[in-house]
Image (spheres, rainbow, N blue to C red):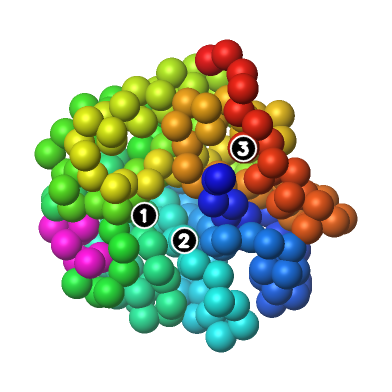
Amino acid sequence: MPIIAPSLLAADFANLKDEVEAVARGGADWLHLDIMDGHFVPNLTIGPAVVAALRPHSQLVFDVHLMLSRPEEYILPFARAGADYISVHVEACTHLHRVLQQIREAGCRPAVALNPATPLSVLDHILGEVEMILLMTVNPGFGGQEFIPSMLPKIASLAAKLRESRRDILLEVDGGITPETAPAACQAGARVLVAGSAVFGSPDREAAIRELRQAGKLNKVRI
């Protein structure tokens, strides 16, 4: 059964506390928090202060995705704010091992994110350092984009790589995840589904989460 992680990027920013509580009541497992700096990606979102303000109002796993040019400078602030997982982009890290060690030393679970065009070979020497791989299924920076179909074979290849590693590493996908794309993503090997518009764009958050989870279980599709 897939882990459902609604993306706060698609929420009503005037009512973030209520939005977080709504998806928790609706059965979400995690909350995905997209942190953008306007440099690594062409958008600017929230910082540690917002994460810290939301943390007392939710028992959800806080899945913090750093889309930042210098992620190493923000590990400790987000850890102190209440992050559980922290994902950093391999494309943004000159010294990836060191950054992953920083995340673990800060008390969080380290994860690595890959853009759609980034080859999986960059993971060959860091699988022992991570607890999750986040594969972007859209180009990062904006919500509401459509799933890139050519990412399905890449998800499957990554899932095979993780099985071969014999490590319990989660495979998360982010971008264009809907009840229509979730079955193929899960059949390819995704275990965590990040969904923004598909959840926060629905007037019934509980029904939207339930539909996504069911779609992820009914993954009898051809890739």
- Circles 3 and 1: CB atoms closer than 8 Å: no
Q: Is residue 71 magenta?
A: no
Q: Which residue is mark 1?
A: 87
Residue 189 placement: quadrant: top left
Location of residue 110 with respect to 126 vertically, above or below: below
Q: Position of residue 131 (x, y in %)?
A: 29, 53
Q: Which residue is mark 2?
A: 63
CA distance for labels 2 and 1: 8 Å
Q: Magenta span covers which residues? A: 98-104
- Circles 2 and 1: CB atoms closer than 8 Å: yes
Per the rendering, the mark at residue 216 is 3
The amino acid on which the numbered mark 2 sits, given as a three-letter code, is Asp
Farthest-out residue, top: 222
Label 3, secondary structure: give it. helix
Residue 26 placement: quadrant: bottom right
Badge 1 density bin: few <14, some 14–19, many ≥20, Cα 10 Å:
many
- Closer to the chain start, of discs 3 and 1, is 1
